[in-house]
Image: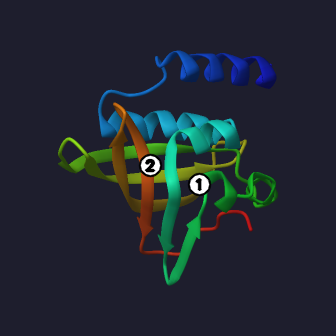
Amino acid sequence: MTKNLTTLLLTLLVSGSLWAQNPEEALYKYFELFNIADKDAINEASDSPFVFLIGNNKTVSKNYGDSVDFEGLRKQGWAYSKINKSELIYADELSAMVDINFSRLNDDEKVLSTTDATYLLVNKNGKWLLKAGFINSNLSLGK
C-alpha cells in the first residue's frame, strides 16, 4: 500500500499537480510527504542546500531528506506529524515565510511534542520549495 501511495505521489509530482500554487499550501503538502517518509519526494519539495536552525544547532544539508532519520523518529514513538495552525507572514514572487505550529503524534494519537516553526520557501520555476526551517526549541530529527 505504501509503495502504491509513493508511486501515485511521485506520478503527481512529475506531472506537476502535486505542487502547490502558494507557499502555505506547499508546506501542508510537504507535511504529507514527511508523513509517508519519502525522502526522494521530500528532496524534490525542498531546495538545495537546505538549512535548519533548531535551538542552538545549525545544519546545512545538500537535501532536506539527508537531515532526517525516519527510523530514529519511529523509535522515539513518532507515527506522523500534523500542522495545527499556519500563517503566511511574508510572500513575494521569489520567497515567502510561513509560521506554523505542529505536533508529532504516536500511533495512539497521543501528542509527543508541539512545536512552533518558521519556514522559508523559494519559488523556482513556479514551484514553492522549502529552503530553511527555524525552530527556537529543541526538536529531534531522529538522529
Q: Is residue 142 above or below residue 71?
A: below
Q: Position of residue 60 (x, y in %)?
A: 55, 69
Q: Is residue 124 above or below residue 102?
A: above
Of helix, strand and loop, which one carries label 1? helix
Of helix, strand and loop, which one carries label 2? strand
Q: Position of residue 54 (x, y in %)?
A: 50, 73
Give the colouring mode of the picture. Answer: rainbow
Q: Which residue is mark 1?
A: 64
Residue toward you, 3 or 59: 59
Going by the numbered disc 2, the residue's amino acid type is: Leu
The residue shown at (43%, 55%) is 131
Q: Position of residue 34 (x, y in %)?
A: 61, 42
Number of numbered discs overlaid on the protein picture: 2
Specify whether residue 8 is in view. yes
Q: Position of residue 142 (x, y in %)?
A: 72, 63
Give the alpha-carbon distance from disc 1 to disc 2, as whole Å: 8 Å
Q: Relative to residue 59, is residue 4 drawn left or right?
A: right
Q: Is residue 8 above or below residue 56?
A: above
Q: Quadrant of the N terminus?
A: top right
- Answer yes or no: do the residues labelled 1 and 2 have beta carbons within 8 Å? yes
Upstream in sequence: badge 1 or badge 2: 1
Crowd around label 2: few <14 · some 14–19 · many ≥20 (10 Å): many
Q: Which residue is mark 2?
A: 130
Crowd around label 1: few <14 · some 14–19 · many ≥20 (10 Å): many
The residue shown at (49%, 79%) is 55
Q: Relative to residue 64, is residue 88 drawn left or right?
A: left
The residue shown at (60%, 42%) is 42
The residue shown at (48%, 33%) is 29
